[in-house]
């Protein structure tokens, strides 16, 4: 059981209550005792009944004596009544003081706690990224100042966030433009060179044009294909469709994908059969081919690329490990960012797409790498029925 | 009704404060069983207050001030008040003669006595006769006692004597079927 935590404010208030009410109770006890003693003493104060029997010399004396007796009896009665009254009202007043001070205590405590709770909730919202939170500037003076200061801070944070978002957008567009320009320029240069070569040959030696025509056309076709693939990459990243999960054996799918690469690359497969995952098959294909393509780009053709598939508790774990040069630690943290690449050819969208597709299917992708030893990409997918 | 509720709440608060913070005992007045007797056209009631005048009262009685005790009798059938009567017993002591002068309101009777016990018995007793109508049928008879505020001329101060009863109003209720009585 969680014990409630009491702040210094609560401790001070409780201490104040204990001291003040405790002091009043002690004081009341002292007065009550004193009054009891007085009352007891009053009880023993009696004018003897015999005084009434005394025969006075004159009628005036008798009247005077009667007056004294009457006065004494009345004073005694009044004193007793007053003592009872004061004892009675002292206890009642003390009870009222305790009740009223307890009520004030609870009210003050709640009035102090409420804005603090509001402030805590607001800071939680700020932490969650909602900078538009605004606190009503009510309550005691100090609390108003605190809330005002908080509101100023949240407004500034919101402004900073907006500026950052604009700057980020601008940066993304700049990056994208740079990448696009670079990627489009890359195939355009060979195309331009091929066309120039053909023009020059037509001008200088028209008879031998046929010799370089096929070669130039192949270059142009190849670069046009590269441009098409570039467009396709951007398009795939922009349009990740909603995952249509279906149950299949991942080992079979991986084997089929690897078939087309088996002739040119050294793929070492260790795939546990009869596992079932629920995943979008097209997404799965895109993920595997992207990671595999990266592995192939990173390592020499003869070096092995190990693919292992196994069950770990209720998960299916797929690992693709290459024996390439590895990724620098500072780059490893950014490899899933869009447009990040260290390759001479590439858009930097492949691994970003992998991450996006994994998220769409509820899977996790992790990467680890060691310079000189290679990189390993791990996919963790929940086992399906 | 609101007054009765307030009085009960106040009495409870007083009892609590006395219990918690005071050694003051005061008195715990209560009525003995209310005896009711139906005549041809009159109902006769009789009861006695007990434990009402034990503590502090001897000196208050002997102060020479006139000490009244109020009784309120109420007969209700259902929620309808059929009859309400107020009575005030009184006692006054003469310190020079040692005589108590008692007025018993219900019986409209005066009593002079030197005996404290006799005075106590007279002032504590309640006896009265009231007219009734058998058509009232089943009725509840409620009797309540209280002490009024008394002004002491010597100090020119009013003292609420209910303090001595710790603001408890003794009361008793009994039920009668007046149709059966006839």
Image (cartoon, rainbow, N blue to C red):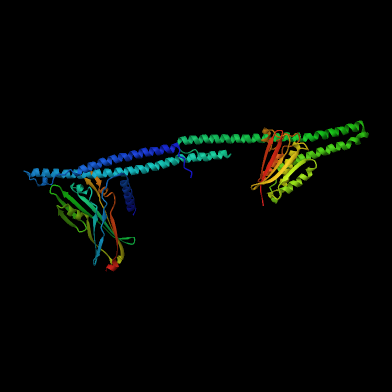
Q: Where is residue A7 in the image (x, y as percent from the top left)?
A: 45, 38
- Of A260 and B14, which appears nearest the observer? A260
Q: Where is residue B21 in the image (x, y as percent from the top left)?
A: 31, 44
- Of B72 and A342, which appears nearest the observer? A342
Q: How many labels does the image show?
A: 0
Q: Residue furthest left?
A: A57
The answer to whether A193 appears left or right of A362 in the picture is right
Q: Where is residue B65 in the image (x, y as percent from the top left)?
A: 19, 48
Q: Quadrant of residue A337?
A: top right
Q: Which residue lies furthest to the right in this view?
A: A207
Q: Quadrant of residue B82?
A: bottom left
Q: Which residue is drawn at 15% across and 53% down?
A: B113
Is the residue A51 above or below the residue A199 in the image?
A: below
Q: In which quarter of the image is residue B83?
A: bottom left
Is the residue A226 above or below the residue A274 in the image?
A: above
The answer to whether A180 appears left or right of B85 in the picture is right
The answer to whether A344 appears left or right of B147 in the picture is right
Q: Position of residue A210 (x, y in %)?
A: 91, 36
- Of A380 and A356, which appears nearest the observer? A380
Is the residue A30 above or below the residue B48 in the image?
A: above
| Residue B154 seen anywhere in this rendered image of the structure | no
Q: Residue at x 86, y 32 (%)?
A: A196
| Residue A375 seen anywhere in this rendered image of the structure | yes
The answer to whether A241 appears left or right of B118 in the picture is right
Q: Which residue is drawn at 29% across and 68% down?
A: B180
């Amino acid at each position: 059981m969680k014990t409630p935590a009491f702040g210094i404010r609560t401790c001070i208030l409780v201490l104040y209550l204990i001291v003040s009410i405790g002091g009043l109770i002690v004081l009341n006890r002292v007065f009550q005792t004193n009054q009891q003693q007085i009352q007891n003493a009053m009880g023993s104060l009696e004018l003897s009944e015999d005084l009434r029997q005394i025969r006075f010399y004159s009628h005036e004396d008798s009247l005077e004596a009667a007056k004294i007796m009457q006065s004494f009896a009345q004073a005694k009665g009044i004193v007793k009544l007053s003592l009872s009254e004061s004892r009675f009202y002292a206890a009642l007043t003390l009870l009222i003081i305790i009740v009223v001070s307890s009520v004030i205590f609870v009210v003050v405590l709640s009035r102090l706690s409420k804005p603090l709770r509001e402030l805590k909730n607001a800071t939680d919202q700020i932490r969650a990224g909602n900078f538009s939170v605004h606190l009503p500037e009510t309550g005691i003076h100090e609390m108003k100042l605190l809330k005002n200061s908080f509101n100023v801070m949240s407004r500034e944070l919101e402004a900073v966030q907006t500026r950052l978002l604009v700057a980020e957008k601008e940066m993304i567009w700049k990056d994208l433009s740079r990448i696009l320009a670079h990627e489009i320029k890359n195939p355009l240069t060979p195309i331009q060179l091929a066309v120039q070569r053909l023009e020059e040959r037509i001008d200088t030696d028209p008879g031998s044009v046929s010799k370089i025509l096929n070669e130039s056309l192949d270059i142009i076709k190849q670069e046009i294909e590269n441009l098409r693939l570039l467009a396709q990459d951007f398009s795939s990243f922009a349009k990740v469709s909603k995952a249509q999960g279906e149950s299949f054996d991942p080992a079979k799918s991986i084997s089929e994908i690897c078939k087309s690469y088996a002739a040119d690359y050294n793929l070492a497969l260790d795939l546990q059969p009869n596992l079932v995952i629920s995943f979008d098959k097209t997404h799965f294909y895109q993920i595997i081919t992207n990671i595999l393509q990266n592995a192939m780009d990173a390592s020499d053709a003869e070096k092995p690329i190990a693919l292992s598939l196994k069950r770990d508790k209720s998960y299916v774990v797929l690992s693709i490990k290459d024996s390439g040069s590895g990724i620098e630690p500072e780059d490893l943290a950014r490899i899933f960012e869009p447009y990040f690449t260290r390759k001479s050819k590439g858009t930097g969208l492949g691994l970003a797409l992998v991450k996006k597709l994994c998220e769409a299917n509820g899977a996790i992708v992790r990467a680890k790498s060691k310079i000189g030893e290679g990189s390993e990409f791990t996919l963790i997918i929940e086992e399906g029925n | 009704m609101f007054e009765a509720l307030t009085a009960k709440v106040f009495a409870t608060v007083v009892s609590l404060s006395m219990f918690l913070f005071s050694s003051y005992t005061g008195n715990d007045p209560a009525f003995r069983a209310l005896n009711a007797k139906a005549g041809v056209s009159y109902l006769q009631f009789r009861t006695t207050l007990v434990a009402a005048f034990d503590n502090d009262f001897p000196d208050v009685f002997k102060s020479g001030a006139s000490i009244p005790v109020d009784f309120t009798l109420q007969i209700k059938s259902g929620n309808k008040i059929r009859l309400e009567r107020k009575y005030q017993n009184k006692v006054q002591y003469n310190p020079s003669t040692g005589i108590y002068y008692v007025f018993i309101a219900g019986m409209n009777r005066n009593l002079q006595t030197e005996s404290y016990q006799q005075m106590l018995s007279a002032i504590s007793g309640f006896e009265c006769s009231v007219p009734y109508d058998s058509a009232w049928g089943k009725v509840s008879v409620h009797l309540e006692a209280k002490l009024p505020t008394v002004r002491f001329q010597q100090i020119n101060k009013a003292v609420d004597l209910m303090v001595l009863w710790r603001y408890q109003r003794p009361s008793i209720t009994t039920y009668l079927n007046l149709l059966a009585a006839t």
